[in-house]
Image (spheres, rainbow, N blue to C red):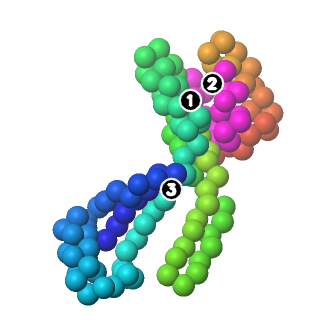
Amino acid sequence: MYYLSIDDGDLFIGADGNHRTCIARFEFYRKGHDILHGVTVDNYHVDWKTKRLFDEFSEEIERKELPYSIRVEPETTLREDGPGWMIERYRIWIRVVDYRDHRHFCLNVTEFERFVEDVRSGRDRGFLERIRDGFVRFLKS
């Protein structure tokens, strides 16, 4: 069975398992059990401010036909394992493709906020010049 939760909220069936959940609840009640094995629960913590900015800017790119595409690229920074559990922590990068220069670059959240601000104010070329000077890390295509 597979469940997911966002920001420690309610559990939702992630994929496969609705009927199994029903059977398990009935069996647990009938037999008086309280431990269930073979269950996966993924709990995602969301940076809602960055998600809103990413979604708004994605729509803006499409609406204004800007020469960019963006996508989120998580990087695993830490993994902790214990008996029957595992936690992974991620750093979020935003991969930006600039179709004018045919370049790809990756921004952390703060850099992405600055980039969006510069694009909205018409200073995006200045931002790209700072990138060329080593302001952020580049990715190979």
Whether 102 is drawn above or below 33: the answer is above
| Residue named by callout 3 | 8
Q: In the displayed image of the protein, which residue is found farthest to the top?
A: 122
Which region shows up in magenta? Answer: 98-117
| Residue named by callout 2 | 116
Residues 66 and 30: in front is 30
Q: Is residue 108 left or right of residue 68?
A: right
The label shown at residue 53 is 1
Residue 116 inside the magenta-drawn segment? yes
State if disc 2 and disc 3 touch (CB < 8 Å): no
The label shown at residue 133 is none
Whether 99 is drawn above or below 13: the answer is above
How many numbered marks appear? 3
CA gap, disc 1 to disc 3? 22 Å
Pinpoint residue 115: horizontal percent, then vertical percent.
67, 27
Residue 125 inside the magenta-drawn segment? no
Q: Residue at x 26, y 87 (%)?
A: 31
Which amino acid is tagged 3? Asp
Badge 3 crowding class, 10 Å Cα cut-off, few under 14, some 14 to 19, many 20 or more, is few
